[in-house]
Image (cartoon, helix red, strand yellow):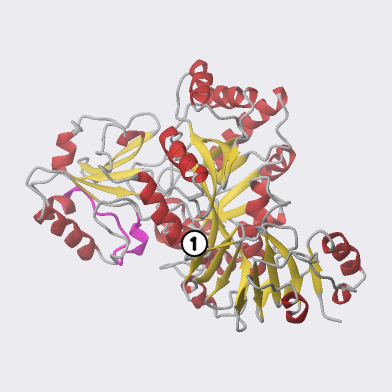
Amino acid sequence: MDNVTVAGLGRPVVRVLAAAGLLAVISGCAPEGQPADLIFHSGRIVTVDAGLGEVVALAVRAGRVEAVGSDAEVLRLRGPDTHVVDLGGRTVVPGLTDNHFHALGGGPGVDLSGVRTMVELLAAIAARAAETESGELVVTNSNWHEGQLAEQRLPLRDDLDLVAPEHPVVVVRGGHEFILNSAALSRWGIDEADESPPGGRIGRYDDGRLNGELVDRAKDPVRLPPRGAEDPAARFLETQAVMNALGATALRIPGGTQEQFTMLRRLAEEDRLTVRVEFLFRLRGMPVDEVQDVVESWDVPPDFTTGLLSVGGVKLGVDGGFEGGWMREPYEEPWGRGGGFHGLQTMPTELFHGTVRELNALGWRVATHAVGDAAIDLVLDAYEQADAATPIADRRWTIEHGFIPAPDQFERMRRLGLTVTAQHHLYVAAPSLVDYWGTERAALTTPLGLYVDEAIPVSLGTDSPVIPHNPFAVLYHFATRGTISAGTMGAEYAVDRMAALRAMTTGYAYQVFAESERGTLAPGMAADLAVLSGDYLAVPDAEIPGLTALITVVNGRIVHDGR
């Protein structure tokens, strides 16, 4: 008898028979008169369901997986209007996700994503300056990192002065740092007498001169112009098309504005979204007694959902990024500060505690950016204090990034029911992290295998545009711990390919309270899936980042067809 499991019939039966080793004898068909909308057959369908494993065919109806099994049984569900896809042996996986996606491509500035040397980087800035009126601002995008450069260093003030002395230049480096030339420092009134503000760092050369680096709160005086007349809705529609082509079916936006949410809500209500969006509002430091007014101004409840758009909570931040993660132990001091630099605490302790308590009292879930182990300490302290007032253990509050966890923190995370969002920053930034923190700490960065061993629920993403947006590079890094320019780092924290895929599918679904709806291709689950250009589970490691999606389906609808 051929194998098939049917929505509404098979899932409970699958659990029983799989336990008895009898999964192969399940069979069935859809109710008469209700054929499938979409059928995939003759492929390798990785359901990521423990009971089902792999199958060769899958049927979709009304946005859900209707049946999985053999070609013969699933093709019986074909009707006159069923769209049938012969996979020809291609691999299908549940839709890929990104747990920390800000934007695509880093903005409209000078594109540095493809440069690989300092000469190329400076030439790109010089070319933009040559076509820009003298005295006008030149800004780069943020979709790059010095780890991609042969020189493994940042462009600094003197470098920028050489190629654009008549233009204020702001090099945007990730989400936490700007680098300015002399004209830009002058434009915003930053001079040699200025000292680093609380939660920020003003960089200097060894001789004490400003080198143009402004980290975290130190960059607050620099006000870059808005993106102009570009339509944010059109930009997002382009973004989701790019991500659909990479098999992505869900994006979690970690800290957006009211205006961004309003735009996404309109797209959702117009049925123009082709990815699911979990949206977190961003709340920057403000007096605690103002938090309620701000939250109420959003005019949505904490569990709001419409179409493919859901609200996922509030994003806070307590430390810097690569260059400012707040650590228990000091940095390796590559900047000559004479010892004692532990990173940057970007939100005062009492303000953070008070904000977390208030958000909890208002019924909102909290997700906090915390890179270093000292930052994670602060997050755990505040979450525990909030939990003492109103329990949070069943609400899946989050630590965003969690680069450097300490052994004594895992039990506290488990007790609070926390989740962690992991991204592949080490893949791009490894050489810089070695400089900042030393080889041992750098190799620990985002230890997915350790989180899994410690039973901490974890999902995967990119932090685009800080790190490029390719989800297959994420899977590659966490399955190999390979990096672009520093070889393999922290191999003991790698997981196998299937575990990485689970973190990106079922791990994400759990984090957003959708584990009963998404993350696997079992019957009854949402039909979010990707047909891949190659077999993720079998291609050589080096080929994983080059994979794409031939077909992507969201909620039963084909949203990308690149065949």
Q: Is residue 316 above or below residue 54?
A: above
Q: Is residue 166 above or below residue 358?
A: below
Q: Is residue 80 above or below residue 489?
A: below
Q: Nearer the viewer, residue 199 or 508?
A: 508
Left or right of 371: which side holds 213? Answer: left
Q: Residue at x 33, y 58 (%)?
A: 146
For badge 1, the amino acid type reads Asn
Left or right of 261: which side holds 167? Answer: left
| Residue 410 percent coordinates (x, y) | 69, 45
Residue on which the image places disc 1? 244
Magenta span: predominant SS is: loop
For mark 1, does the 10 Å Cα neighbourhood hold few (<14), some (14 to 19), or many (20 or more) residues? many
Q: Nearer the viewer, residue 211 or 514?
A: 514
Q: Is residue 270 above or below residue 31?
A: above
Q: Does residue 256 show up?
A: no
**Magenta span:** 143-158
| Residue 337 percent coordinates (x, y) | 34, 41
Q: Nearer the viewer, residue 179 or 534?
A: 534
Tell me, yes or no, whether the highlighted magenta stretch contains residue 179.
no
Left or right of 548: which side holds 520? Answer: right
